[in-house]
Structures are given as C-alpha cells and as structure tokens.
Image: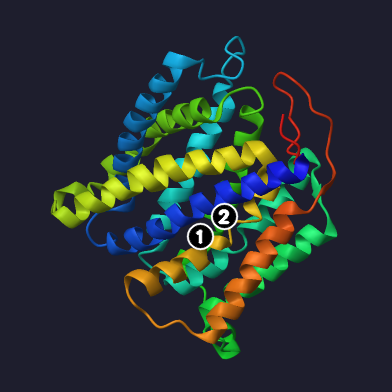
Amino acid sequence: MMASASLRAFLWVNLACLCWAGNLVVGRLLRDAIGPGLLVCVRTLMATVLLALIARAFNRGAPVDAKPSAPRPWGLLLLMAATGIVGYQGLLYQALHTTGAFNAALINACTPLMTALLAWVVHGTRLSAGAYAGILLSMIGVAVILSGGDGARLRSMHFGTGDLLILIAVVLWGVYSLAGRQVMQQRSVIGTTALATALALPLSLPLALLERSWERMEWTVGVAGGLVYVAVFASVVAMLAWNRAVRLAGPAHAAAAMNMMPLYALLVSVWVLHEPFHGYQGVGGAMVVAGCLWATLAPTIRAKPVQTGSAAISGGSKAR
C-alpha cells in the first residue's frame, strides 16, 4: 500500500515537473518584458480565479475539505503563500535575470536533499540510506546532462547573486512542502492549494507596486501567452499535482522526484526545438529516472507520532 502511494506520488511529481520545465523557459523568455514582482502578482491573480472555479465545481458534488468542521489553519496557509508561491517564484524569476539556466538547474537539483533534511529537522522523518543514494544518483545524472559530459564545465562554474537567490528559493520550497503536508492531513488538496494561492495575492501585490515594471512593458501576444502558461500550468496544474504528491507520500519522498525537471526540459528542447540528442544525455537521463524512482519508493525509517491541532504532523510517507 505504501509502495503504491509512493508510485502514484512519483507520477504526480512528474506531471508537476513537466509543467515547471516549461515555466523555467517562459520565465527566461519574459525576463526582459515583465518584472518578477509583476509576473508573480499577475500569475497569482489568474491562478486564484481558476482555482476558485475548480473548488466551486468540486463543492457542488462533494465538500472540498476532507474535514469541513476543522478550523482553517490560517498560519500554515499564510506560510505556504509566503514561501512557495510568492517567495520561491519571485526569487526564481529574479535570479533568471542574473544567472544562467545551467547554474539554476544544478542548484535546483539540491531541492530533494534540502527538503529531506528539513523534514528530518521539523518532523523527525528520516529517509533510508537507499533513498539518499537515489537522490545522489539523480543529482549526478542532472550534472551529466547539464555539463555536456564535460567535468571541466562543472569545475569552472562561478556563483553570483542570482545563484544565492535560487539557493534561498530551494529552502523556501522545502518549507512550503512541509507546511502543505501538515495542512493536507486535515484538508483537501484543492482547498489547500486554492486558499494558499488566494492568500499569496495580497502578499505579491506590494512587490508589483514597488517594482512598477508595468510602466515600461509592452503587452504582446507572446507576453499574454506566457502569462497564461505560468498561470494555468505552473500555478494551477503543477501546484495541484505537487500538493497531491506531498499528501500521498510526504514532502521528502515527493521532492525526491523533482530532479525529473531538467530531464523534461531536455526532452522538450529535443522535441520542440529539434536539438540533437547525445549519448551522454541518455546516460544522464537514465541515472535521473533510476535515482528518482529509487529515492521515491525507498521506505521512511522513522517519524514522530502524528499529533492533532496546532502540533506538528508527521511528514512520513504513509498517507492517511
């Protein structure tokens, strides 16, 4: 049963990673057309409307919340909004102005490890040695893909301000995932995602007002299309898929499959842009898939007992 939940979580994370791979490309393309604060604000506004409609549709047939009588954990929902929706995305878009996709993807490959460490510190959830080995294997696979099989490229990497922003964003994503796991022990995935996104809107508005990037931007078909993509796929589809995976398997196991994102970015470039596919990419891709599967399906060693109310709820791999 636990293995089945972990496998389903792996599939949900793959859907999220496929959407987020496109988000990196779109964010890079829009970096000169729209400021990061305004981009986060507009996509959050559009996503809030879409999620409200989805929640309303589900509410007609059945309650959106798993436990309607349970009070809404506004503090945790606000933490999710500030970290994973406003903080993570804002830092990522800002970093894309000053760092390349190579550095960004390599630093993002640390997300599974960072989330696992946070889950251990906060909830006492410990992954097995096999899970950590799988995470390491997937990180090596990402490095193989992005380095072009040339170790000298990795050794010549230079880190700047944008890279530090991405590293902070990785930590914020781990916090978002842990908070989401706790909320979704009592509430539905749709309800949690919709409420957290709605709370992110007033948090993102001051960033857009301070930035004032709308004064110099030009509204083109490309900009509009990019905004629709990040709102529908990166903010709604991907976030619902990710939160579903977190509820099924816990934040540490869900994050173990996030290194599939660079692989999807590679496949999109080969398919859409007709870029050549090299042998080292196949080797690195196989390492990523094997490592992500290995880490996701590996068992959790120990977790603190589940508590109710405002106490911390375990982030173990068994979903309830």
Q: Is residue 253 left or right of residue 258?
A: right
Counting from the top left corner in percent of width and height, residue 198 is at 40, 29
Relative to 55, say whether 25 is above or below: below
Relative to 140, say whether 301 is above or below: above
Distance between the alpha carbons at the discs numbered 1 and 2: 6 Å
- Any part of residue 217 in sight: no
The quarter of the picture where residue 257 lies is bottom right
Counting from the top left corner in percent of width and height, residue 82 is at 49, 38
Relative to 243, say whether 156 is above or below: below
Counting from the top left corner in percent of width and height, residue 313 is at 74, 30
What residue is drawn where x is 50% and y is 50%? 15
* The label number, if any, that marks residue 129 in the structure image: none
What residue is drawn where x is 57% and y is 90%? 152
Q: Which residue is mark 1?
A: 166
Relative to 154, say whether 69 is above or below: above
Q: Which amino acid, mark 2?
A: Val
Considering the numbered disc 1 on the image, is that residue within a helix, a strand or a loop? helix
Q: Which amino acid, mark 1?
A: Ile
Counting from the top left corner in percent of width and height, residue 167 is at 56, 60
Q: Is residue 11 left or right of residue 185?
A: left
The quarter of the picture where residue 187 lies is top right
What residue is drawn where x is 51% and y is 61%? 261
The quarter of the picture where residue 144 lies is bottom right
Name the residue nearer the viewer: 320 or 181: 320
Q: Which residue is mark 2?
A: 170
Q: Which quarter of the rendered picture does the C terminus lie within?
A: top right
Q: Residues within 10 Å of mark 2 (few under 14, many from 20)?
A: many
Q: Which quarter of the rendered picture does the N terminus lie within?
A: top right
What residue is drawn where x is 69% and y is 49%? 253
Cβ–Cβ under 8 Å for marks 1 and 2: yes
Considering the numbered disc 2 on the image, is that residue within a helix, a strand or a loop? helix
The mark tally for this picture is 2
